[in-house]
Image: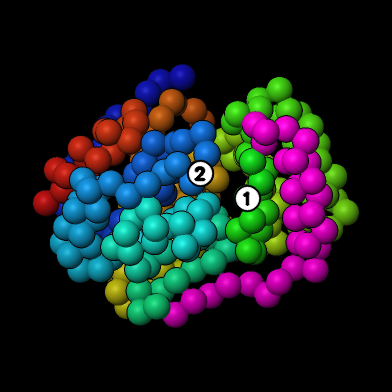
Amino acid sequence: MLSLPAPKPLRLADAALFLDLDGTLAPIAARPQDVRPDHRRTRLLERLRDGLGGRLAVVSGRTLADIDRILEGRVTCAAAVHGLVRRECHGALHEPDPHPGLSRATAALRAFAATDPGLLFEDKGTSAAIHFRLARARAGEARRLAGKLAAETGLVVQAGDMVEELRPPGPSKGDSIRAFMATPAFRGATPVFAGDDATDEHGFAEVARLGGYGVLVGRPRETEARFGLRNVEDVLAWLEAAR
């Protein structure tokens, strides 16, 4: 598969910038809690936020609390839990009502995680996830359990990089980007979205539909993104070249 061309330096005056977190702004860690604030990244986000006139949003599978912890509260506009939760630039919060099947799924995933020290259960409040990066031999079991629970509860499986997540049906990353672009702060700008995971494809498709472009981070694959960067270091260098 051919590699995608690298994007040109971002023009801050024209762009609305959407960024995934893990694998894009920060290297993926074996345990989600191991990703921590970084001085270089924090200063860069401050400059981008100011240069873009506030047209900067993080669109991540993380919770809002985790986004704020890792980015030291520098980005107010955020879509969390893969778009299920969205915080507008003035702080208004949009999140779903509790799903009736979530407590059952949470208990089952927690019990499964207890069977192996390499399995990690994550309670996101509106969703629940099982990470198996440190227990790859259990990946098949984790996927089968997630599929079974989804069928029984009406939750949706959100597959990720060495993680299976159960979340209520609801907005995707692309839906959140569309909602941000409809607000006065973002309206009229060219949307750009950088991300690495399969969950980011909805976002790539949406920015393309709105006249912008996606930037795939990592190994080449079939994608809706027009451009590509190799890794987090390349993403940071690209963003530091923005003017």
Q: Position of residue 94 (x, y in %)?
A: 53, 75
Mark 1 — residue? 122
Horizontal side, residue 196 vs residue 56: left or right: right
Q: Where residue 32 is drawn, which disc sits there? A: 2
Horizontal side, residue 217 vs residue 10: left or right: right
Residue at horizontal 34 percent and vertical 44 percent from the top: 25
Q: Position of residue 54 (x, y in %)?
A: 25, 68
CA gap between label 1 and label 2 equals 9 Å
Examine the structure image and report whether residue 144 is included in the region drawn in magenta: no
- Residue 28 shows in this picture: yes
Residue at horizontal 44 percent and vertical 80 percent from the top: 92
Examine the structure image and report whether residue 107 is included in the region drawn in magenta: yes
Q: What amino acid is found at the position of numbered circle 2 in the picture?
A: Pro
- Between 170 and 128, the residue placed more toward the observer is 128
Q: Residue furthest left?
A: 243
- Between 116 and 44, the residue placed more toward the observer is 116
Query: Mark 1 or mark 2, which has the lower sequence index?
Result: 2
Q: Residue furthest right?
A: 152
What are the residue bounds of the magenta stretch? 92-119
Marks 1 and 2 close (CB-CB < 8 Å): yes
- Residue 216 shows in this picture: no
Task: State the SS at label 1.
Answer: strand
Task: State the SS at label 2.
Answer: helix
Q: Residue furthest top?
A: 1
Residue at horizontal 81 percent and vertical 49 percent from the top: 108
Res 154 quadrant in image: bottom right
Res 45 quadrant in image: bottom left
- Between 168 and 64, the residue placed more toward the observer is 64
The image shows residue 6, relative to residue 175, as above or below, that is above
Horizontal side, residue 23 vs residue 111: left or right: left
